[in-house]
Image: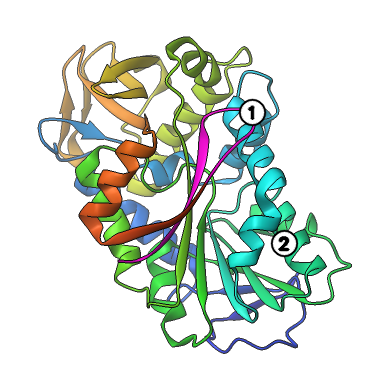
Amino acid sequence: MTVTAATTVVSPDEQSGTIIDIGTGTAHDTVLSQQKQMVQQRLLKKENGKRWLPTALIWGDENAHQLWWEASNLDEFYSIRDEVNLLKRWAQDIARQVPDHSVLFDLGCGDVTKVIPLLNELERSGKHVHYYALDISRKPLESVLAKLPTTYQVVKYTGLWGTFDNLRAWCGNIQEPKWFLSLGSIFGNDEFQIATNDLRKWVSVMRPQDRMLLGLDGCDDDEKVWRSYNDTKDCWHRMIRNGLELSNKVLGHEWYRPEDWEVIGVTQRRSPTLTHQWVARATRVVQCEPLGLYLSPGEEIITNEWYKYGPDGMQKQFDAVGFANVGQWKSPSGPVYQYLLALA
């Protein structure tokens, strides 16, 4: 599959299926550099008394993508099923909102089964759009593009290899209406201050004609949420440990050894929101002198966290960042929502 250098020219005749490297230099080097910076800021240093493994490392390589596919096919992992059902049910309604000659950016395109119903409807209705699938890993991006229909006539698609920061810089010269798709609980899915800080970054690059389609799981069932992440095949547990091992590579030192850590899932209520997090807890002294890292037995690292905000909680985020909620859809199979956002 062809990988080309970055360009911000949107050509309606561009062949579908190519990949554009939108990183500075190479996307691979850019991703590693940004991952290292995040780990240094959040893991090696305490933030509000806590250490964090950045979420980007949980999704940071091909092993993570494979484990994600395993998890997403399990019966207990309900959110993927509900997200797909939502877009199947409401694809026609959502597609009506998309102007002809729009550009769609899929922010983390690990599962194109979600977006295909929307693309199919845009094709059926004759809307000329260009769909860009963004991912930080090239091989999973190739796999995603290979799953898209080759029969489209008016829908074009291209892969973007890079980070969210790369995309915000890259898309600045595009004149067509831009739609940013966060279809699977990527943005808005965090502690309020962190979530709103992330959303403001997208507000800053949007114009009155642009939109964000933001999906979030609002499940309030403790047991259902617990089962979805603590799955029978240990997919999520293995994914978290894979991210911890990846941090060794990113930092250039083996600070993480599996035998020094237990990884546990924790579901709790932080009124009024249900949350689930994966925590790595040291079982012995962990020390890495080159990194200046020292942890006592029992010290914890938060590795991934999900906030199950319902519509009221999300509206507070939108109000805080200057978004107007101009459309809203609910999955027919569960409390998963898609919010259509414009500048207020």
Tell me the element at label 2: helix
For the residue labelled by badge 1, is the local secondary structure a helix, a strand or a loop? Answer: loop
Q: Quadrant of residue 305?
A: top left
Give, as a single range, the part of the protein colored magenta.
Answer: 329-344
Q: Decide which of 140, 187 is in the foreground and name it.
A: 187
Question: Residue reaching furthest right?
Answer: 151
Q: Please give left or right for residue 333 compared with residue 107 in the image.
A: right
Q: In the image, what residue occupies the spot 71% across and 74% down?
A: 18
Classify 10 Å Cα crowding around label 1: few (below 14), some (14-19), many (20 and above).
some
**In the image: residue 248, left or right of residue 296:** right
Instruction: Kindly identify which residue carries mark 2.
Output: 119
Residue 200 point in image, percent of width and height = 27, 61
Distance (Cα) linking label 1 and label 2: 21 Å
Residue at 59%, 77% in the rendered image: 102
- On-image quarter of the C terminus: bottom left
Q: Are marks 1 and 2 in contact (CB under 8 Å)?
A: no
Location of mark 1 (residue): 333
Q: Is residue 51 magenta?
A: no
Q: Is residue 152 left or right of residue 3?
A: right
Q: Residue at x 35, y 15 (%)?
A: 266
Instruction: Provide residue 297's location: percent of width, then percent of height.
Output: 20, 12
Res 206 seen here? yes
